[in-house]
Image (tube, rainbow, N blue to C red):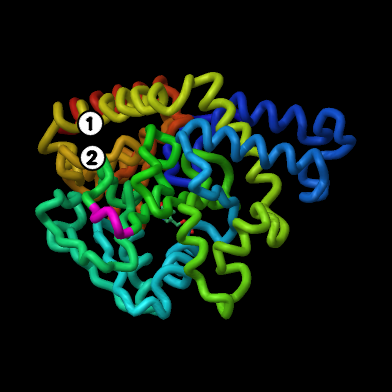
Amino acid sequence: TTERVFNFSAGPAVLPVSVLQEVQDELLCLPGAGASVMELSHRGKVFIEIMEQAEASIRSLLGISDQYAVLFLQGGAALQFSMIPANLLRDSGKSAQYLLTGAWGKKAIGEAKKEGTVDTIYSAAESNFDRVPTSSDYQVKDDAAYLYYCSNETIQGVQFQSEPACPDNVPLISDASSDFLSRPLDIDKYGLIYACAQKNAGPAGVTVVIIRRDLLAKGCDKLPGYLLYRNHAENESMWNTPPTFPIYVLGKVAKWLTNDIGGLAAMESQNREKAKLLYDVIDKHAGFYLGHAQVDCRSTMNATFNLPSEDLLASFVAEASKNGLQNLKGHRSVGGIRASVYNAMPREGAQALASFMDDFAKKNG
Ligand code: PMP
C-alpha cells in the first residue's frame, strides 16, 4: 500500500506533506533549471541561491546575527562529537565540561576524551537519565574550553526547558539535533549549536552548525581539512561539495515553518499541545503507563514510557500499528515506547495516538 501512516519515528522522521509534494513536483526538473536539483553544480547560480535562501530562512527563524556563521556540513551529528573538541579542546591546555543527561551526551563525551581533558560535571546516570540538572547541581570551571550539553536526549526523552547556566566567558555548546527549530532560542547565549537535519529539519545528510565567529580562529591548521570549522566558514560551506539535496529540502522545511506555521513561537505552542495530549494520557493512567522522564524535564519531541509487561508492550506496538500508528518502539538500548512528535507530526496524529493509548489502558489496565 502507498497510504501514509502516522509515523512516530525518532529519525529520520516525518516531514511536512506539502514539502514532500513540492519536492515531488520539482524532482524531474526544477523550474527554469532544466534538471533536478540533484543534477546541478553546487557552484552554479541556481544552487547557490537555494543554499543562500535556506541559510537566510534559518537566520530569520532563529534571529541569528552576523556574529555567527551558519554551516551546512556532512558526517551527521556524530561528527560534531569529534569536530567540537578537535577545534576547541585539542592543545588548548583547558578542560571541556560536559553535562551528561543521556545516550547522545555519553557518546559525545567518549569522542571528546580522544581530544583532551573532559570533566563530566553532572551526570544523571544514577537515576537512569530521567532528568536534567538545575544550576545548583553543577559547577563550571571559569577557564573551561566550553560547556557542552544535549538539549533534548532523543532516546531517553528528557529535555532542557531553557539553557543551562554558564559563565559568560565560557562558550556554551549544544547538541540540538532532536529539538532544532522546534522552539525559539536565544542564539547569543551560545558559542556553538548544531543539529543533524533528520528529525525536524529535513532528510539525513546535512548537519547545521551555528558557530560564533570568534571561535573559528581556534582550530589548528594541522587538523584534517574537513574537520576545521574555519575552512567551511571561509568557503561558505563549499570547502567541498555540500549535500545539495538535503540542503534543498531543509530550505523548503524552513520556508514551511515561516509561511505555513508562522515562525518558531507558533511551532513551539503546537508542539507543546501535541506533547500534552500524550503526557495527559500517561498521567491519567499512571501505574499502567510508566513515564520515563521527570515531569519538569519531559521532552516535547520524544515521549518515552513503558508498560507493565513485555507482553503488553508487544501488543501495544502491534495494535497501534494496525491502527496506522507506527514506529513506536523505544530505542533498542532502553526498550519501552517512544513516540516522537516532531514539528511535522500533525495534531491529528498525536490525538489519534492519545485516544489509542486511552482505549488500550482501559482494555488492559
Ligand atoms: N545527537 C542526538 C541528540 C541525536 O538524536 C542523534 C541521532 N539520533 C545524534 C546526535 C546522532 O546523529 P547522526 O546519526 O546524524 O550522527
Q: Confirm whether the magenta stretch covers residue 168.
A: yes
At a point 18% along the width and 59% down the height, the residue shown is 124
Query: Could you tell me which secondary element the residue under label 1 belongs to?
Result: helix
**Where's residue 20, x and y in %?**
64, 31
**Placement of 7 over or under 118, stated as above or below:** above
Q: Quadrant of the C terminus?
A: top left
Residue at (69% x, 61% y) in the render? 239
Query: Mark 2 belongs to which amino acid?
Result: Arg
Residue 254 to residue 135: above or below: above
Local SS, label 2: loop
Task: Specify whether residue 333 is in view.
Answer: no
Among numbered discs 2 and 1, the one appearing first in the sequence? 1
Magenta-tinted stretch = 166-170
Q: Amino acid at mark 1?
A: Tyr
Q: Are marks 2 and 1 in contact (CB under 8 Å)?
A: yes
Residue 124 at least partly seen: yes
Q: Quadrant of ligand 1?
A: bottom left
Q: What residue lies at 62% left-to-right and 59% top-to-bottom?
A: 232
Q: Quadrant of residue 23?
A: top right
Give the residue at mark 1: 279
> Can you give x and y, in whole percent of width and height, for residue 256 in the image?
56, 26
**Crowding near pointer 1: few (<14 within 10 Å), some, many (20+)?**
many
Percent coordinates x, y for residue 299 in the rendering: 28, 40
Between residues 309 and 156, which one lies in front from this camera angle?
A: 156
